[in-house]
Amino acid sequence: MTIWDTAGQERFRTLTSSYYRGAQGIILVYDVTRKDTFEALDHWLKEIEVYSPGGGREIVKLLIGNKIDDEEHRVVTREEAEDWAESRGMLFMESSAKTSAGIQQAFDEVVEKILDNPLLVGTTPKPRAVNLQ
């Protein structure tokens, strides 16, 4: 498994199209305390559709609402995000990178869904190691 974390940063935008080729799973993360990060999801989903083989229809896509440890500053409700993800055929979870809540479960869910889809299993060469970049 190879994992790319672009952090949604502008400087990576010209490189991201190469990340989508051969992707079997994609995790989009927004900050539940910042509405702008939620509103930017449409842009990222559009990139997936444009740059992924087959428009990304077969790719496992998971939306994660992060920073649930900061509930008092939440501006994106769980229901709003769940509805957004469901309407786009995506899985949904919430997490806290600060407390590690939901992090392992998110990766487990994506891997499980990839392995459950015969169209995705074996579509890319198997690396010998996990690369976290």
Image: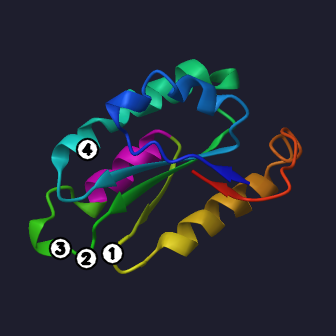
User: What amino acid type is highlighted by mark number 3?
Assistant: Glu
| Residue 101 spot, x, y in % from top left | 42, 78
Q: Quadrant of residue 76?
A: bottom left
Name the disc covering residue 69, or none. Answer: 2
Looking at the rendering, the stretch of residues picked out in magenta corresponds to 79-88
- Spatial distance from mark 4 to mark 3, Cα to Cα? 16 Å
**Mark 2 belongs to which amino acid?**
Asp
Q: Which residue is mark 1?
A: 98
**Residue 110 position (above or below residue 37):** below
Secondary structure that dominates the magenta span:
helix
Of marks 2 and 1, the one in the foreground = 1
Mark 2 in CB contact with mark 1 (< 8 angstroms): yes
| Amino acid bearing label 1 | Lys
**As displayed, is residue 9 above or below residue 84?**
above
In space, the residues marked 1 and 4 are separated at their CA atoms by 18 Å
Marks 4 & 2, CB-CB < 8 Å contact: no
The front one of 42 and 21 is 21
Residue at 86 percent across and 47 percent down: it is: 118
Q: Which mark is residue 37?
A: 4
Q: Label 3, on which residue?
A: 71
Query: Are the two marked residues, 1 and 4, in contact with CB atoms closer than 8 angstroms?
Result: no
Dot 1 falls on a residue whose secondary structure is loop
